[in-house]
Image (tube, rainbow, N blue to C red):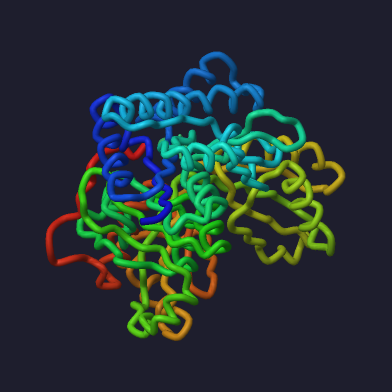
Amino acid sequence: MGLVVQKYGGSSVADAESVKRVARRIVDAKKAGNDVCVVVSAMGDSTDELIDLARQISPLPPARELDMLLTAGERISMAVLAMAIANLGHEARSFTGSQAGVITDSVHGKARIIDVTPGRIRGALTDGAIAIVAGFQGVSQDTKDITTLGRGGSDTTAVALGAALGADACEIYTDVDGVFTADPRIVPTARRLKRISSEEMLEMAASGAKVLHLRCVEYARRFGLPVHVRSSFSQNEGTWVIDTASMGAEGENVEQPIISGVAHDRSEAKITVVGVADQPGKAAQIFEAVAAAEINLDMIVQNVSAAATGRTDVSFTLPKTDVQTAMTALTKVQEQIGFDALRFDDQIGKVSLIGAGMRSHPGVSAQFFKALAEAGVNIEMISTSEIRISVVTRADAVDDAVRAVHTAFGLDSEGGEAVVYGGTGR
Ligand code: ASP
Ligand code: MG
């Protein structure tokens, strides 16, 4: 008995039948005596379809209008889901992100939640209704315009609402049985993790594991909200994402595996600033320009400068969707900074190995690089954190690299293959 927030992803509500199936599941949770608040994503691939539609109309749609368009996807799911629940004889009320009190900053396309004031949700729950909230959207505190939280952002809506409502847990329903040691679409022998620390989950999400939105993990960690990632297509227990501190308190992290998983990412590109003077202040100028354009960078590499010219190249990776903006921003300051040229490469991929046990186990990087070498994968960039090693490779080498590393670290399961219940992985 308690208050549970459930989030259903796009593949769980892809068509009318799925919506009805999910409605039954929600009603079951309600009948078990819980107050239930549900967050939904847009049906199937409809967000991608809306983006395609916008692109057919305009190569660079105004960000405000693109957000207005995309939020329509979630509004469709919330309304049809509420209808399906009504058919089962229960009251459901749907709310847009704005109505649910999701207040954000004003950065269209990747707004941050700054406050959640879920008065109307509380009211609905007090009246005994099931509250359905459109994920991935909010309203800007300053401009009052509708914003979106970035792709996959419904997870973050769910956790933010869960925290604001004081929920006991947040259940994230998806098309696989939880968090796996690698994407089961690439590695069918991937194993489901029973639990994962929030710090490792953060690294996985930041490294491209699409199962949870990065900000959702940050949020859950900040508010100590347990997150249960599981499939809406089965009754199987999924993966619990748990704060490391509480894992310690239960004394259960003693036998933590060294490696938790392998993540990959094909959504990034690389920009190289060619011929930058090797002087103090140049990197600051480059990255100030990029930051002013609201772009989040990932890896940064500066080469050794050529003795003859005293010039160097600086490369960095960033989301493919931000390449155009970054190139424009840097071109504007080319003369001022005094570099020779800009190059970009969108055929890169990233493969990361994550595990808290890395801290205390030497030799993990050596084994990682050896596995890549044996698979014939060339490494272009390397970055590390305390519990992660990432490499940039050619995009078409990613699948081989992930499989090779997964096997080299003994992560393959002996039992059955991981089930992917739905979704196109688009
Ligand atoms: N519908 C949005 C997307 O596809 C948000 C989400 O699924 O969480 O990115
Ligand atoms: Mg989606």
> In the current view of this chain or complex, which residue is farthest to the front?
127
Using the image as rendered, state which of residue 118 and residue 170 is in the foreground. 118
Residue that appears at 83% across and 48% down = 337
Residue 214 appears in the rendering: no
Q: Position of residue 349 (x, y in %)?
A: 45, 50
Q: Is residue 117 left or right of residue 22?
A: right
Using the image as rendered, state which of residue 403 and residue 397 is in the foreground. 403
For the N terminus, the quadrant is: bottom left
Q: Position of residue 58 (x, y in %)?
A: 59, 17
> In the current view of this chain or complex, which residue is farthest to the top?
57
> In the current view of this chain or complex, which residue is farthest to the right?
336
Residue that appears at 25% across and 60% down = 190
Residue 329 sits in which quadrant? top right
Using the image as rendered, state which of residue 339 and residue 286 is in the foreground. 286
Residue that appears at 40% across and 47% down = 35
Q: Is residue 61 left or right of residue 9?
A: right
Number of numbered discs overlaid on the protein picture: 0
Q: Is residue 217 left or right of residue 68?
A: left
Question: Is residue 414 depicted above or below 139 in this figure?
Answer: below
Residue 253 appears in the rendering: yes
Question: Is residue 181 depicted above or below 53 in this figure?
Answer: below
For the C terminus, the quadrant is: top left
Residue that appears at 53% across and 20% down = 55
Q: Position of residue 295 (x, y in %)?
A: 67, 45
Q: Position of residue 226 (x, y in %)?
A: 44, 62
Question: Is residue 202 depicted above or below 132 in this figure?
Answer: below
